Image (tube, coloured by chain):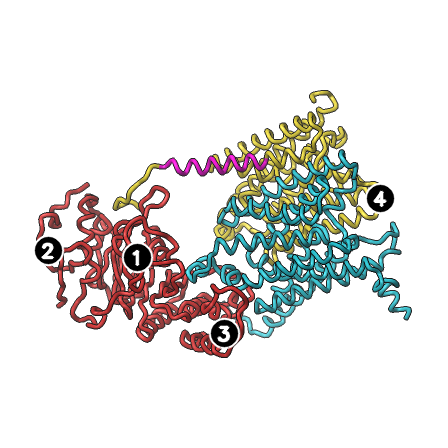
Chain colours: A red, B cyan, C yellow
Amino acid sequence: MAELSARSSVHTGSVEARSSDEAQPAQARPPVLELDGVGVWLSGREILHDVTFALAPGQLAGLIGSNGAGKTTIFRIILGLLTPTSGRVLVGGHPRPRRNRSVGYVPQKIALDPDMPLRSRDLVALGLDGHRFGVPMPSRRRRQLVDDMLDAVDATRFADARVGTLSGGEQQRVLIAHALISRPRLLLLDEPLANLDLRSEHEVVDLLARIAKEQDLAVLISAHDLSPVLPVVDRVVYVAHGRVATGTTDEVATTEVLSRLYGHHVDVIRLHGRILVVAGHGESVDPTLLAQLSRSVATVAAGDDIPAGDDIPAAGDIPAV
Amino acid sequence: MGLWSHIVAPGFFQSSAVHNALLAGGVVAVVSGVVGVFTVLRGQSFAGHSFGDISATGGSAAVLLSINPLVGFIGMGVVAAGCMEAIGVRRARGRDVATGIVLGAALGLSALFLYLSSTVNSTTGAATTVLFGSLFTITTATVPVVVACSAGVLVVTLLLYRPLLLSSVGDDIAAARGVPVRMTGAVFLVLMSVAVALSAVTVGAILSTALLIGPAATALRMAKRPGTAMLVAAVTGLVAVWIGCLLAYDSYSWPPAHHGWPVSFFIVALVFVIYLAVDAGRWWHSRRLNAHHAPVES
Amino acid sequence: MFDAFMVNTWIAATIVAVVAGVVGFFVVLRGSSFAAHAIPNSAFAGAAGASLIGASTIGGLLAFAVAGALGIGWLGRRGRHDVATALAVVVMLALGSLFLSFSTQYAPETFSLLFGEVLGVSSSELGPTAGLGLLAVVAIAVCYRPLLLTSVMPDLAEARGTRSYRIEMAFLVIVAVATSTAVPVVGALLMFSLMIGPPAAARSFTANPPVAILLAVCFALVTVWTAIAVSYVTNWPIGFFVGALGAVFYVVGRVYAGWHSHRIAPTPLQPGLA
């Protein structure tokens, strides 16, 4: 049975709620990525509110949420393309400057024209030094690095093909190689499974899990749906309406936790190893209560007692709004 | 000997006007080809074409103010590049409209300058000259300046090679890798405006577009690597300009007016024919490839 | 400026503005600004060729404008659209310069063909101008829904059976027809300014298509009438005022859009809202 350290201090929710079954070393190592109370206002609208979670090396996390929930915004903040209105972001313990190359990024899909004069290996090579001025000088070392990386993602057979002619799955591998070749500490993938067929989905997911362990990377995958990544993720960051709930899958993907996150009743059903989140009827939650709830949400697992405290109402007390 | 003198009319290699034309035209073709590859890749052909007309506006202004045309062409081009960047629209369609507005305003100014200079200086032929230009009327003094500026453009383009390439693949992966995407784009826009201005003052506005886009589009049909594409584009442009000059020189005795056909016509025709030929070649090649595969039952 | 000999100009200008507003709305919507610039340039080449062989100027305009439009459509199928447009425009202009070189006494007409001429429309030309303008507007009305659908959601349109390629070709030809009405009055080079500035501004004020079209027509009318009036008084070319006013309208539209979006009050996140 999972043991939880239900500390009540404000920002512990994401980091501390780990079961004792998990690898001990992960708990002891400093996190590669830390978001602490991050909030974002854009064009007069609040996009993110008090987002807090962390990732340790070797961990693979799923950033799950529907469109508009805030996933892309979180990515942009981690990449340093957007400055949060409040809170802070640390990568490798340092605040996130623009040119920090310890984050690799794989976008969802690039519209590549068929006449783009780049072969797969050229695109991967740009991952090494695409930001530098001047023309790349060919060198054996460079070529070797590229070959090795292409081999690692199993892309050698289309290494010399034009990137514009690759299929979705092939393009994705090349983009992953491009992101990895500079040895980042954190890898972000924006909906990597969205346009793939089922078999490619499995392949990519297995590839990512293997890479995370082999290279001791932290990997954050964004997706609509938890099921395809369920076999390989260690943790889940569930995003809804700009708020998050984080913890292991078991902790977060529960009826209680997600209902509080969404603000209305949802049912979480587990079926044959897959997780389904189903919206039900139900009353909305009072928004002021939700703010208090979301901080301690991740410390709660289904079936366990909710930590005692006057400010946390029992389920039956939530008034209909 | 008879055949040779039909292909190359006598006096071709001795004429100093031809020398200037070959040198200046050749240099401009090479730079346009290289810059053009990025222009086409980034979908900025409209901007590239606009700079030709816009810098011609600068030319009209120069005629009016009696200053060096080169200054007018390049100056106006850079100002326009700044305006386009300042309007700064991100979505492709919005950018299209912004380019069109700047172009429209510049053309309107062109009308004004030409009108004013025709009343002031009574030079009525200015419209055609400024717009269409002529390779054979470049003064020997301008040639070194054109060569030097072109070399400068080439150097900066090569400096920007990698960031530009990565931005052309995708803004977000470039930004994620630390490329200053907005600044790279702005610098490239200015580069393009200078390259096109140099080209327009030498060969005229129409030809500047043809040399910027045509060879690059042709090269992109064929090349698998960016360096190859730029090389092919440069060579194609060069060949088109040189053979065009030759044909124009030969045409001096042709009907109907017996003062030669415009060199811009020949060069454009060559650029276009080469593009069509390569395009047809690829189409035929891919049909042959597809014919070898058994049809799939669906 | 309201004397009898100017009446033709006012009528022609009104026709041109209406056509430009209606067609221009779709030009901006479809991102076809480059084609809208290229096709009048082709028209210019046609006028040069027509005067060479002594044929009707409008006929030459129309023939080459349509040829340019078809060329853009055909080349665009095989490659990038903007590359196709660039190639088409340079080929047409090169032909134009060829024709110009054959004739020797063309300079003043060149200027007015390019930049517009207050007295550019003779009575005999008014009929064809009106006819072509009507044709362009009617064609837009007929193709209204497929045009909207293919502009906004091309994939959905394909699924419903609308052939995007045919619509694109039809639209380019419509632009060609519209162009040939305008060239004698506002000039080849500035017709496209009318098709871009006023409609782009109109779109900043409303998202409702019929209202936007109406607004585009109004802005275009204001532009053309002002241009003619001021040109008449100052003798400066019409094209200059058209270009300048088009830019002014565009800027006003952008400023308004920017101001409008800042007026929305701050809204914090609430659960249950998408």
Verify CB contact (< 8 Å) between mark 3 and mark 4. no
The subunit letter for the residue under badge 4 reads C
**Extreme residue toward the top, this view:** C3
Q: Residue at x 89, y 56 (%)?
A: B253
The alpha-carbon separation of the residues under discs 3 and 4 comes to 59 Å
The residue positioned 69% from the left and 21% from the top of the image is C2
Q: Dot 1 falls on which chain? A: A
Q: Are marks 3 and 4 on the same chain?
A: no
Mark identifier at residue C104: 4
The residue tagged with tag 3: helix, strand or loop? loop
Residue placed under numbered mark 3 in the picture: A159
Residue found 66% across the figure and 43% down from its top: C176
Q: Which residue bears the numbered disc 2?
A: A307
The type of residue carrying mark 1 is: Val
Q: Amino acid at mark 4?
A: Thr
Name the residue that disc number 1 marks.
A89
Q: Position of residue B137 (x, y in %)?
A: 79, 52
Q: What is the CA distance from the residue labelled 3 to the residue labelled 1?
A: 36 Å
Badge 4 and badge 2 in a common chain? no
Count residues near mark 3 (Cα–Cα under 10 Å), then give few for <14, some for 14-19, many for 20+.
Answer: many
Say which quarter of the image contains residue C216. Answer: top right
What SS does tag 2 mark? loop
Bounds of the magenta segment: C246-264
Compared with residue B223, is residue B196 higher up or lower down, i.e. above or below?
above
Can the viewer see residue C178? no
Q: Say which element carries label 4.
A: loop
Residue sitting at x 33%, y 55%: A74
